[in-house]
Image: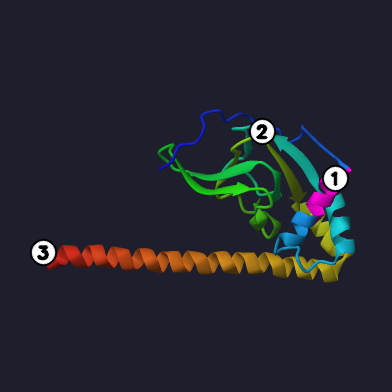
């Protein structure tokens, strides 16, 4: 189990806002590269970007905690984020290390389930957040584009499920080999 920096701090959820015209152009390019939004026409992506919220997190700062309500999709504009799952024993398992252009929290756009892991800034980071109520309103106003977004999210979920299934089969085979090896010595 990997440990992360002990410099974990409180959340800056409602402060540290930033806005700049060059950042908006970068964000447009990042949005176009994300499967969830890749089929959305540029005109509508610009409308969607108007709904985003920008946050700055310091190295070691908590972005959200495991079991918090899932409220939105997070996209890394600058910096690095580590996704960790906290065990009942207090230990942490690193699930992913993400960098510019990566995204996380997309399941929050589909349902109201709590977060399955925590997200922590691994270094100073600028994060673009799209909150579920804003996306829901966008989808109500532009249903054709909303369908494209919903399909994009479902493709991400399907891809991740396939990956988990493949990982499960690999682990199952390893376990069978270990158990088979033990029984061979009996």
Q: Is residue 129 left or right of residue 121?
A: right
Rendered image quadrant of residue 178: bottom left
- Residue depicted at 90% across the width and 62% down the height: 43
Q: Residue 83 got which mark? A: none
Rendered image quadrant of residue 37: bottom right
Q: Is residue 126 left or right of residue 23?
A: left
Q: Is 154 colored magenta in this rendering?
A: no
Q: Is 25 colored magenta in this rendering?
A: yes
Which dot, 1 or 2, sits closer to the camera? 1
Q: Residues within 10 Å of mark 2 (few under 14, many from 20)?
A: some
Which is nearer the N-term, disc 3 or disc 1? 1
Q: Residue 185 got which mark? A: 3
The N terminus lies in which quarter of the figure?
top left
Which dot, 2 or 3, sits closer to the camera? 3
Q: Residue 22 got which mark? A: 1
In the rendered structure, which segment of residues is drawn in magenta? 21-28
Q: CA distance from mark 2 to mark 3?
A: 54 Å
Rendered image quadrant of residue 176: bottom left
- Residue depicted at 87% across the width and 57% down the height: 46
Tag 3's secondary structure? loop
Q: Residues within 10 Å of mark 3 (few under 14, many from 20)?
A: few
The C terminus lies in which quarter of the figure?
bottom left
| Residue 77, x across and y down, in percent | 72, 46
Q: Is residue 121 left or right of residue 128?
A: left
Q: Residue 11 got which mark? A: 2
Query: In the rendered structure, are the residues bearing label 3 and label 1 in contact, judged by CB atoms less than 8 Å apart?
Result: no
From what the image shows, is residue 103 above or below residue 151?
above
């Amino acid at each position: 189990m990997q440990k992360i920096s002990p410099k974990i701090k409180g959340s800056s959820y409602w402060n540290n806002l930033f806005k700049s015209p060059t950042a908006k152009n970068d964000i447009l390019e990042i949005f176009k590269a994300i499967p969830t939004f890749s089929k959305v026409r540029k005109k509508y992506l610009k409308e969607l970007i108007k709904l985003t919220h920008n946050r700055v997190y310091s190295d070691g700062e908590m972005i959200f905690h495991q079991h918090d309500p899932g409220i939105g999709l997070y996209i890394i504009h600058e910096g690095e984020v580590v996704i960790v799952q906290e065990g009942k024993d207090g230990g942490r398992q690193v699930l992913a290390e993400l960098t510019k252009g990566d995204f996380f929290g997309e399941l929050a756009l589909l349902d109201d389930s709590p977060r399955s892991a925590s997200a922590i800034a691994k270094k100073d980071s600028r994060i673009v957040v799209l909150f579920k109520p804003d996306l829901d309103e966008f989808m109500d106003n532009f249903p054709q584009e909303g369908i494209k977004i919903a399909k994009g999210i479902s493709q991400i979920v399907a891809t991740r499920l396939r990956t988990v299934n493949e990982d499960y089969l690999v682990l199952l085979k390893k376990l069978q080999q270990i158990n088979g090896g033990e029984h061979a010595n009996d």
